[in-house]
Amino acid sequence: IKEATKDLDIEAVIYGRPKHIYSIYRKMKDQKKQFSEIYDLLAIRVLVDSIKDCYAVLGAIHTKWKPMPGRFKDYIAIPKANMYQSIHTTVIGPGGRPVEIQIRTFEMHQVAEYGVAAHWAYKEGNKEKVTNDPLQKQLDWFKDLIELQNETKDAKDFMNSVKEDIFGDKVYVFTPKGDVSELPLGSGPLDFAYNIHTEVGNKTVGAKVNNKIVPLNYQLKTGDIVEVLTSANSFGPSRDWINLVYTTRAKNKIKRFFKLQDRDENIIKGRELLEKQITELGFNFKDFMTKQGMKDIAARFNFGTEEDLLASIGFGEISYQTVANKMTDKARKEIEDQKVVETAFEKTTTQGLKKESQKMKIRHEGGVIIEGVDNLLIRLSRCCNPVPGDDIVGYITKGRGISVHRKDCPNVQLPESEQNRLIEVDWEDTANTGQQYDTELVVEGYNRNGLLNEVLNVINSTTKSLNSVNGKVDANKMATISVNIGIMNTQQLDFIVDKIKQIPDVYSVRRVIS
């Protein structure tokens, strides 16, 4: 190589570099290659002063030795995300052995060997021949990290995003003006649009690749020329875009759009979910809010206002159970401290109820019978939605009467010390009264044309009460359909389930306990 570059009048440092044994192992494992497929066991490194000299040396080497197809990588024209720059080429050397050659400037070598911080240390040497990129481009990698950290609250999701979006395999595509964009392998036109700017992504109505219209789920390849079609009149992204984008950054930007768009609805939904959970924990929501308030709780979860917290709960970013537990932890501790008094009270109350139960059977609203107990608030629990025919049990709450659960409901699987809070209840023995009881079913199957319609037709033909329908499809074309229906008893429920199971491509039907 020294002989081949002698006539170029270039000052170069040329030396050999053996590949470390552990690096060989990692490359074989990560890229699933055999030892015979590792071509850079021995590499020769060429260091020069300028980028122009890099390409001059490359030309001289390719003139002398034949390059191996598919083994040329130009990380100078298209640097890696971590600022690594170098030209890699593999040529057929003496004796027919492949040899990798790496060509880079001295500045690039400092960054490659000693990290990004070495870049500024190298600048102190005032190497005027080195071509400098603007500092803004040099720091793109750090900006990406900070943006991912700000948009991803869960640490595990953040680490997965870093590995996939920043350190994963890349594709390099071009804008119509010739600018290069680096994207994770698997990205599509929407990932490209959101990589340019959030508003470009939100206003996207289509895309062209290599001057041809392509669907938004098109997977970009290195060398594609991508043009994003936008419209100022666009209403913004569709909700199914979440399934079309690959990068976490694009997913977060789409989620943020809907979070802001549905903020008022999410605040209402978040408040309802929180109230329901606090009520299930045995507290009066309004009294509890007066007692503690939401501002301190919002601050504990790093939200500026209580509306921000409620909106986040409604959007599903933070669990309402977690917030409810935080809000009630002090009150629950006070109850625990008075456990002896409470236990004695509950035992006395329960014994009184059971003693009264020996007298007579009294029917309560909802078709539930409790022996000997009248003028008592009875409610069917929404967590398991019991219906006539289910095995049920009563649970004595604090100040809110008795809630009726299915016996297999997780909320009544109590430790031995709390078994005295359970009381025997039963359904009315009389025939069907026509009363409707809500229950939720989840149907799973292969997503084919007409599947949803067939499921709904079966339901509409067997019950007059269809309260809600929700559906989603995953990447494996598995459809999940959730329906809330009104039924009279378990016999009718079993009939409906059997009919749904007879539909082709339905894999399972299950009843939901929340």
Image: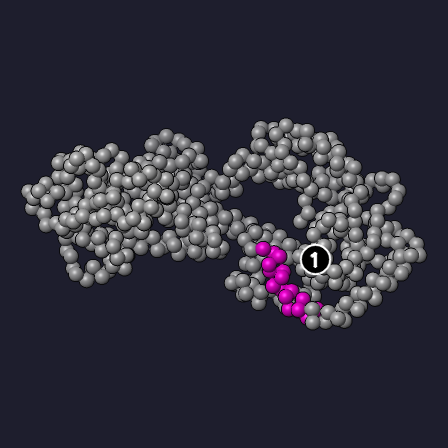
Point out residue 337 in the picture as x, y percentages from the top left corner: 69, 71
Left or right: 296, with 194 as reference point: right
User: Is 9 part of what is drawn in magenta?
Assistant: no
Question: Who is closer to the viewer here, 18 or 367?
Answer: 18
* Vertical comparison of 22 with 123: above or below: above
User: Is 325 part of what is drawn in magenta?
Assistant: yes
Predominant SS along the magenta part = helix
Answer yes or no: is residue 232 visible: no
Check disc 1 and give the amino acid type: Glu
* Vertical comparison of 188 with 290: above or below: above
At a point 43% along the width and 49% down the height, the residue shown is 161
At a point 66% along the width and 69% down the height, the residue shown is 333
Point out residue 306 in the picture as x, y percentages from the top left corner: 57, 62
Circle 1 sits on which residue? Answer: 280
Answer yes or no: is residue 308 visible: yes
Figure quadrant of the N terminus: top left
Which segment is the magenta one?
319-335
Point out residue 140 in the picture as x, y percentages from the top left corner: 33, 52
At a point 21% along the width and 40% down the height, the residue shown is 99
